[in-house]
Image (tube, grey):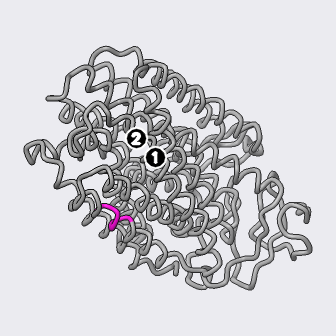
Amino acid sequence: MTTPSDELAEGARPVQPTLPPNLAGTVESPALGSTTTTSGSAFSAAPTSAVSAQRPQKVKVRGKLLKLMLSMSVANLAIFAIWGAVPGILLPLQVQGLVGDGAKAGTLAIIATIGAFAAMVAQPIAGMVSDRTRSRFGRRAPWMVAGSLIGGLALVGMGAANTVVQIAIAWVIVQIAYNFAQGPLSAILPDRVPSAVRGTFAALSGLGLMLGALGGQIAGAAFASSIPTGYLVFAGAAVVVIVLFVVLNPDASNKGEPQAPFNLVAFAKTFWVSPRKHPDFFWGFTGRLLLFAGYFMVTGYQLYILQDYIGLGAKAVALVPLLGILSLAGTLISTLVGGPLSDKLGRRKILAVIAGVILAISLVFPLVMPTVTGMLLFSFISGLGFGAYQSVDTALMSEVLPSKDDFAKDLGVLNIAATLPQTLAPGVAGAIVVAFGNVYTPLFPIGIVIALAGAFAVLPIKSVR
């Protein structure tokens, strides 16, 4: 394989692991032992020793790798804008318009629960299917494009729905389709990116994720009076961005590659992350699941919190853009610092813990200050904590994946920890509110406890510092 020096590191000594043909470049690495490559993948799932975290490879991000990094950030933005706008703003408003204020919390809880279950199942299936896909466009691109197209059509269907049942069916299709786009997209990180720059790569990728989720809320509020138009705009934007990603970052044909046999029993077991066989992956999964749950219990239910807990009523939608801007500001600061800092220090865990604690602290403000000021403080500080955690945790998890042959499947399972809380959060929050007699106060202490548990769950990980 040729490795032109103008792509990654000039004058570096080419060693294994190598980059795929479309990201070829030279990598300078200390003697860390041999690293094998896998079929259709640039690197093994992770350097799984502490040494690898202490002595990262020296890699300069240039050329096609830089283009991949930037375009993946935009792709994440487009998909997560849907997750920010729809369950955070448009779906709650649509439900409220159909069933009224009295039944909105319970109805949204049911729809969110059904959709979350669909997302949980779809992610690892999407990863497994893409891992075994053989085509002239590689194994990821066909599913990314198909998922965005089908998901877009389902969003348009949601806009045309006029019953709760129709909305629920369309939302399930949206969850499945976009997870078939998102799962293969997430596999790009271990597929094509050297471990030494995964923190930086994950920071920008995570920035796109957060810009999308928070920017989606801001943009979603602009479509509060025209929900079907909002669904159409978000669907169209995602299709265009995903297609451009595939065109700008083409994968090599893998039509001739051998295909690993499919084992149904083994695949079914992937839904259970064994703490005995893969303890590091288990703790990383648990940490992400808990911390995301604590965060999205509040942000995913933010519209109803502003309406009923803060007491803004119909004026709540107007405050959403300001809260989103504050969260984006905090996220931008911490994301651009967190990932690169973890690369420089060779440490991931302590930064993830600090970030999680900051996020938990942010939940204190609306608890003790049930006012607009309390929500403003929460938005900025939670953006700081969640942005830092997202960037560092993504890099950390890329180094503890269980299988070197099934990146997308393992990332699909891992992404359950990210997508499940986000899509299920309105339902969980609604159930808590209903259980306590339509009182919102319990959301915050419960969120604090869950977020802290998630922050400290990464400490038992041994293979990454």
Of residues 421 and 351, the one nearer the viewer is 351
- Relative to 105, 178 lies left or right: right
Q: Residue at x 56, y 69 (%)?
A: 338
Please state the horizontal and vertical placement of residue 13, each as a whole percent of the image. 87, 76
- Examine the image and state in which quarter residue 423 appears: top left
Magenta region, residue range? 359-363
The residue type indicated by label 1 comes to Gly
Q: Establish if 347 lies above or below 161.
A: below
- Relative to 124, 249 lies left or right: right
- Relative to 338, 67 lies left or right: right
Residue 410 inside the magenta-drawn segment: no
- Discs 2, 1 touching: Cβ within 8 Å: yes
- Examine the image and state in which quarter residue 288 appears: bottom left
Q: Secondary structure at mark 2?
A: helix
Identity of the residue furthest to the left in this view: 437
- Examine the image and state in which quarter residue 248 appears: top right
Label annotation for residue 391? none
Label annotation for residue 320? 2
- Per the picture, the main secondary structure of the magenta-coloured stretch is helix
Q: Which residue is mark 1?
A: 324
Residue 362 inside the magenta-drawn segment: yes
Q: Establish if 311 lies above or below 200.
A: above
The residue type indicated by label 2 comes to Val
Callout count: 2
Please state the horizontal and vertical placement of residue 200, each as a whole percent of the image. 65, 65
Q: Residues within 10 Å of mark 1 (few under 14, many from 20)?
A: many
